[in-house]
Image (cartoon, helix red, strand yellow):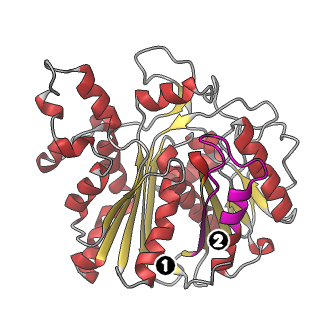
């Protein structure tokens, strides 16, 4: 098992999802048990399913100096950056530490693929239309390039794309940069937007539910895809009462391209490593935000792992019934939801779920609960066996 790490302060955080923009909008929807999922009105071709669509992206206009990177993903990033004053906090960190000492880690599974789809649909002969011809726009690193310009950070800038674990893994990467002295602050960004390739791709895998997803329900039948932008600022020290990243764990079980290890080996290794780095036992975790995609195998395996590792008193839930599965942004979205749970003593239930599957233990919370929470674990598991678990704590550890 890995050694314990020094806790890192989370000095700023925001998230924009189908529930709204900023932390307060997320908290209000969680308390009201109001889902952000709605009938698919995104694809031109019919696809009967529920989606988590962020309102207002179409009305966003990027500044002139960013127009060469214009895409739905980057408009969503721009919208999200301005939630909870995050852009000001990030720029203040650059001023405080120096641009070369602030790292920027971007996570996405689709980047600007929606713009690439549009470019191919509007070919002028064998060339992209002029408005979509910028080469950088069509690279996986386009989000990082955009954020570098906006925030002004000049430290290490890297992109992470490991499917649905992407924006959880950047917390681990950020901790390593700070621990090794390669940065004094790290801006973490996870952004993924709706696009045809993702919606029809998951539908081709027979993983998309026709109705809003039902994580861990005995009758679950697939995911609801959403879009989101989340941002977190990590520093060694923070103000009194700041939440902290206590631990992280990663694994790669590589069992199957789209199915988890049947005994949950990778998930278990990631969770155990995260607990070890936090210096905690499973019984010390008060709340778990489960990956909980509402697919048959993911929920079955994850439920069994949680039931085996954690005591009955631990509370656990999936929040994807609220936001949808936001793919590469899911890790950072659910990390911020954990921070809200810790701050406000609110355990979100598992929306849309009425009859827990047989593999579920007593940890699964269906209804919202109010209780004092000191620690939270967030699970993010991606295709190909990319697993990441994060542990957060409330206040000064």
Q: Nearer the viewer, residue 204 or 231?
A: 204
Give the quarter of the figure containing the C terminus: bottom right
Q: Residue furthest top?
A: 46
Where does label 1 land, which residue? 9
Residues rendered magenta in the picture: 246-271
In the rendered image, residue 322, in percent from the top left (x then y), is placed at 60, 42
Count of numbered tags: 2
Can you see residue 238?
Answer: no
Q: Give the distance between the C-alpha atoms of the residues marked 2 and 1, in whole angstroms.
A: 17 Å
Where does label 2 land, which residue? 274
Q: Earlier in the sequence, mark 2 or mark 1?
A: 1
Q: Residue at x 36, y 77 (%)?
A: 185
Q: Residue at x 56, y 25 (%)?
A: 203
In the rendered image, residue 357, in percent from the top left (x then y), is placed at 84, 40
Q: Secondary structure at mark 2?
A: helix
Q: Residue at x 40, y 41 (%)?
A: 110
Residue 129 placement, left or right of 323: left
Q: Residues within 10 Å of mark 1 (few under 14, many from 20)?
A: many
Q: Residue at x 49, y 67 (%)?
A: 171
Is the Cβ of the residue at disc 2 closer than 8 Å to that at disc 1?
Answer: no
In the rendered image, residue 337, in percent from the top left (x then y), is placed at 57, 57
Q: Residues within 10 Å of mark 2 (few under 14, many from 20)?
A: many
Residue 129 placement, left or right of 102: left
Within the image, what quadrant is residue 59 found in? top left
Q: Secondary structure at mark 1?
A: strand
Closer mark to the observer between disc 2 and disc 1: 2
**269 is within the stretch colored magenta:** yes
């Amino acid at each position: 098992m890995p050694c314990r790490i020094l806790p890192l302060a989370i000095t700023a955080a925001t998230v924009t999802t189908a529930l709204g923009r900023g932390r307060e909008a997320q908290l209000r929807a969680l308390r009201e048990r109001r889902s952000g999922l709605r009938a698919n009105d995104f694809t031109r071709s019919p696809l009967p399913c529920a989606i988590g669509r962020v309102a207002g992206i179409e009305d966003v206009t990027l500044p002139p100096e960013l127009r060469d990177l214009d895409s739905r993903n980057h408009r969503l990033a721009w919208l999200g950056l301005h939630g909870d004053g995050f852009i000001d906090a990030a720029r203040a960190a650059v001023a405080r530490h120096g641009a070369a000492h602030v790292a920027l880690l971007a996570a996405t599974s689709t980047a600007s693929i929606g713009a690439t789809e549009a470019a191919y649909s509007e070919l002028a002969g064998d060339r992209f239309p002029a408005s979509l011809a910028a080469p950088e726009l069509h690279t996986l690193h386009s989000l990082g390039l955009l954020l570098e310009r906006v925030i002004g950070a000049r430290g290490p800038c890297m992109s992470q794309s490991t499917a649905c674990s992407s924006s959880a893994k950047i917390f681990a990467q950020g901790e390593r940069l700070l621990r090794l002295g390669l940065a004094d602050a790290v801006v973490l960004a996870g952004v993924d937007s709706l696009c045809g390739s993702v919606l029809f791709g998951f539908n081709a895998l027979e993983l998309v539910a026709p109705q809003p997803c039902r994580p861990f329900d005995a009758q679950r039948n697939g995911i609801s895809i959403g879009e989101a932008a989340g941002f977190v600022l990590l520093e060694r020290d923070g103000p009194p009462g700041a939440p902290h990243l206590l631990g992280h764990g990663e694994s790669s079980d590589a069992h199957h391209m789209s199915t988890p290890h049947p005994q949950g080996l990778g998930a278990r290794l990631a969770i155990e490593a995260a607990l070890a780095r936090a210096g905690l036992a499973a019984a010390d975790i008060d709340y778990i935000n489960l990956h909980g995609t509402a697919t048959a195998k993911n929920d079955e395996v994850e439920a069994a792992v949680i039931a085996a590792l954690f005591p009955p008193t631990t509370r656990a839930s999936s929040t994807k019934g609220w936001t949808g599965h936001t793919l590469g942004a899911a890790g950072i979205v659910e990390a911020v939801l954990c921070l809200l749970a810790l701050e406000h003593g609110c355990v979100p239930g598992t929306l849309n779920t009425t009859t827990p599957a047989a593999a579920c233990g007593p940890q699964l919370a269906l209804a919202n609960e109010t209780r004092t929470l000191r620690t939270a674990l967030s699970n993010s598991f991606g295709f190909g066996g990319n697993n990441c678990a994060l542990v957060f704590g409330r206040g000064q550890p």
